[in-house]
Image: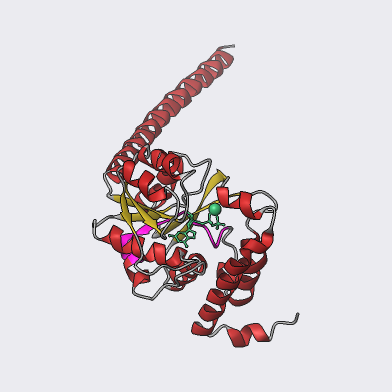
């Protein structure tokens, strides 16, 4: 009887001891997680002090530019905004100036001239000595300030050199991506074929990355987007694709009824990949692929 009582006491004591140990463990893990939370808060706060310059390449975007600029102004990074305009014939420039942005223009009147607009944008942005330069298309109809925050966080908080937006697109949207860029990257640059949006217009990168790319003579036209991906990857920079939800943009409305409007874009994207394949000696290997 006494032995049984002792056994029960022993069991009780062990339970109390275990509970005390557990409480101690919880307390110290709470301490660790508080420390981690504080550390993340400090990193996030420090990141928002970064100098960010945002560039919109534009050509006749009078219907969307104002709303896009207003969304950017709500970003926690409070970017300096530059509009790099390709000699728009509508009110894009007038609206951009009214929204207190800096408007720059490539000297040459080129069409298509998205690359030239980006080059002029990088040059103007570098003069502001930024930490990060970010590009966004100016025809986005569902842009939110989180897009900017997420793209810049990848660089300022997570330490990537370049971040690129990817999204869910309508089934018939992004034809040049699906039918030209991705199959050709698969052929010539299989190591970067996995990027969802090789032609993403939503890209952020550190100042030094843009500086290096600028020295490499980027294409003037639609080839610029895929060229940026290839050259950044070939230089060994750390790239991250950031999911931004769905993308609704005005240009899709015009080519969704007539995909042949994208022929020039398809040709320039294809040529940019071929020129890069030649530069990086990817043609011979690809020629041995059985088709
Ligand atoms: N400056 C300039 N911007 C351009 C030109 N072509 C397109 N853009 C801009 O580049 C961005 C992407 O163009 P968009 O037509 O929407 O291309 P998509 O979405 O890839 O079909 C938009 O902000 C356009 O206004 C150009 O020739 N010059
Ligand atoms: Mg578009």
> Measured along the vertical axis of the image, is residue 129 above or below residue 213?
above
Vertical placement of residue 112 versus 49, above or below:
below
Does the magenta-highlighted stretch encompass residue 203? yes
Whole-percent x, y for residue 242 in the image? 50, 51
Q: Nearer the viewer, residue 248 or 18?
A: 248
The answer to whether any part of residue 77 appears in the image is no
**Which image quarter holds the N terminus?**
top right
Corner quadrant of residue 190: bottom right
Left or right of 287 on screen, residue 55: left
Tell me which residue sits at (51%, 16%) in the image. Answer: 9
The question of residue 154 being in magenta is answered with no
The image shows residue 213 at horizontal and vertical percentages of 37, 70
Q: Nearer the viewer, residue 223 or 77?
A: 223
Task: Name the residue located 55 percent from the left edge and 72 percent from the top edge.
Answer: 268
Seen from the viewer's position, the closer of residues 271 and 213 is 271
Colour setting = secondary structure
Image spot of residue 234 (x, y percent)? 46, 73
Q: In the image, which residues are magenta?
A: 197-210
């Amino acid at each position: 009887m006494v032995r049984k009582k002792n056994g029960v006491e022993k069991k009780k004591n062990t339970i109390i001891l275990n509970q005390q140990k557990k409480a101690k463990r919880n307390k110290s893990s709470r301490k660790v997680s508080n420390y981690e939370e504080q550390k993340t808060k400090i990193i996030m706060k420090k990141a928002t002090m970064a100098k960010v310059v945002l560039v919109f390449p534009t050509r006749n975007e009078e219907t969307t530019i104002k709303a896009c600029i207003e969304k950017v102004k709500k970003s926690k990074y409070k970017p300096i905004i530059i509009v790099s305009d390709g000699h728009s014939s509508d009110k894009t420039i007038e609206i951009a100036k009214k929204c207190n942005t800096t408007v720059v223009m490539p000297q040459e009147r080129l069409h298509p001239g998205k690359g030239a607009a980006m080059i002029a944008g990088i040059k103007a942005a570098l003069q502001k000595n930024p930490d990060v330069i970010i590009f966004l298309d100016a025809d986005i109809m569902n842009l939110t300030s989180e897009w900017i925050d997420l793209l810049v966080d990848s660089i300022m908080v997570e330490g990537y050199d370049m971040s690129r937006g990817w999204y869910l697109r309508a089934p018939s949207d992004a034809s040049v991506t699906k039918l030209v860029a991705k199959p050709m990257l698969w052929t010539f640059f299989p190591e970067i074929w996995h990027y969802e949006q090789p032609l993403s217009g939503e890209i952020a990168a550190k100042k030094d990355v843009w500086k290096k790319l600028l020295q490499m003579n980027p294409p003037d036209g639609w080839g610029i987007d895929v060229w940026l991906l290839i050259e950044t990857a070939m230089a060994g920079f750390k790239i991250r694709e950031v999911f931004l939800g769905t993308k609704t943009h005005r240009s899709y409305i015009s080519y969704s009824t007539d995909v042949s409007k994208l022929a020039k874009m398809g040709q320039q994207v294809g040529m940019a990949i071929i020129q890069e394949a030649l530069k990086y000696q990817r043609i011979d290997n690809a020629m041995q692929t059985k088709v």
